[in-house]
Image (cartoon, rainbow, N blue to C red):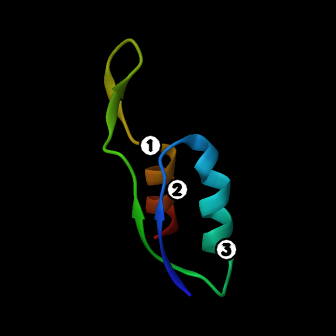
Amino acid sequence: MKIVFFGTPAFSVPFLTELIRDPEIEVVGVVTQPDKPAGRGGDVTPSPIKILAQDAV
């Protein structure tokens, strides 16, 4: 089964992780919010889902 995953917050990471590990599921795309400034310095940081998706490629 092919799916596209939509999610941004950290609580979505375990769900995407399980989908990636499942041999019957092919994650063909991931949609998440753009990188945003965070912290006192305003450093632009990617969402946890973006980090996971890039590592999985």
Question: What's the CA distance linking mark 3 and mark 2?
Answer: 12 Å
Asked where in the image residue 34 lies, by quadrant, the reply is: top left
Q: Label 3: which residue?
A: 21
Q: Of marks 3 and 2, which one's residue comes earlier in the chain?
A: 3
Residue 41 point in image, percent of width and height: 34, 15
Q: Of marks 2 and 1, which one's residue comes earlier in the chain?
A: 1
- The answer to whether 54 appears left or right of 42 in the picture is right
Task: Decide: few, some or many residues near mark 2? Use Cα within 10 Å; few <14, some 14-19, many ≥20.
Answer: some
Instruction: Tell me the number on the disc at residue 52.
Output: 2
Task: Decide: few, some or many residues near mark 3? Use Cα within 10 Å; few <14, some 14-19, many ≥20.
Answer: few
| Quadrant including the C terminus | bottom left
Q: Secondary structure at mark 3?
A: helix
Q: Of the residues shown, which amino acid type is indicated by label 1?
A: Ser
Residue 47 point in image, percent of width and height: 44, 43
- The answer to whether 55 appears left or right of 20 in the picture is left
Taking depth in this image into account, of 57 and 3 the one nearest to the observer is 3
Residue 53 point in image, percent of width and height: 47, 61
Task: Decide: few, some or many residues near mark 1? Use Cα within 10 Å; few <14, some 14-19, many ≥20.
Answer: some
Question: What's the CA distance linking mark 1 and mark 3?
Answer: 20 Å
Q: Label 1: which residue?
A: 47
Q: Of the residues shown, which amino acid type is indicated by label 3?
A: Arg
Q: Secondary structure at mark 1?
A: loop
Q: Of the residues shown, which amino acid type is indicated by label 2?
A: Leu
